[in-house]
Amino acid sequence: MKHIYILISSALVIYLILLTLIYINQRKLLYLPSENNYLDDPINFTYNEFFIEVDKDVKIKSWLIEKDLKKYKTILFLHGNAGNLFNRSYKLNRLYELNLNVLIISWRSFSGNQGKPNETNLYEDAKKAVKWLNGKGVETENIILYGESLGTGVAIEIGQNNKFNSIILESPYTSMVKAAKIYYPYLPVKFLLKDKYESEKKIKNIKTPILIMHGKKDNIVPFHMGKKLFEIANKPKKFLQIEEDDHMLSFNDNLLLEIQNFINKY
């Protein structure tokens, strides 16, 4: 009996140590600025690289693909986890085919930026990008928020109760807590997680048109999460179920046409 007590006590101590280490280092596990999971396609568009000041001594690398800021709508591209701006070149190449301007920003600590990523800071990065566009004469009503994976939580946050033209969500999650439970089912993530990105609670506060796109074979963010957000979202809304795609969509001609039709409609 004594041996069993010692074993249980030892296991509990080890588990508590594990929880402490994960709690302390969770943002290093959540945000992966150095990891590169994407292929770099050749860049077939012209862009202006510059830095947006988001905090004292912190500026984030940004690309502006400008066709005509006054004539066309502007996509604010909020990228997902891992990689840098170049890793999104295959998507930007396709978006360049449309009559759009695109501003893509990189988060703090991504693409060589200074600063530390967390939920509050990512929200602030996006808000400063909107402010930068406004300063260039782009009205909020002409800005399309495009969230990719991690960036969908940011798009939903800043899209609440704001008059953006529309919002496009690629491979979105319902909340970071629910997503983390998939990878860490043995941990009390609800209590451990600092950055919760509670999109499921927020999306009903969005009054602008929403397009949600999700690959049926997504092995990172489950397909049902995108479907759940669509069910909660207000109209007008559209859901694209991409049968053969996984987490990162292929951006083929059919998908590009769907995006174009959605943008033209609103």
Image (cartoon, rainbow, N blue to C red):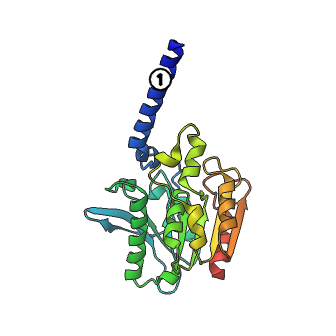
Q: Residue at x 47, y 47 (%)?
A: 30
- Left or right of 49 in this view: 69: right
For the residue carrying disc 1, how many other residues have a C-alpha within 10 Å: few (<14), some (14-19), or many (20+)? few
Quarter holding the C terminus? bottom right
Three-letter code for the amino acid on which mark 1 is drawn: Ser
In the orientation shown, which residue stands out farthest toward the right?
243
Q: Is residue 151 left or right of residue 246?
A: left
Q: Nearer the viewer, residue 254 or 107?
A: 107
- Give the quarter of the figure containing the N terminus: top right
Answer whether residue 180 is visible to the viewer in this image: yes
Quadrant in the picture for residue 182: top right
> Where 190 sits versus 204, above or below?
above
Identity of the residue furthest to the left in this view: 57
Q: Residue furthest front?
A: 1
Q: Residue at x 35, y 68 (%)?
A: 50
Element at label 1: helix
Q: Is residue 45 above or below residue 41?
A: below
Left or right: residue 185 compared with residue 237? left
Residue 112 image point, x, y percent: 35, 54
The residue carrying mark 1 is 9
Residue closer to the observer: 46 or 82: 82
Q: Residue 43 at x, y = what percent?
A: 49, 61
Give how far across and how far down residue 35 sits, in percent.
46, 45
Which residue lies at the image location 53% right of the left edge and 42% below the top edge? 188
Q: Is residue 93 visible?
A: no
* Rendering coords of residue 129 (x, y %): 41, 71
Q: Nearer the viewer, residue 157 or 88?
A: 157
Q: Quadrant of residue 147?
A: bottom right
Quadrant of the image occupied by residue 13: top left
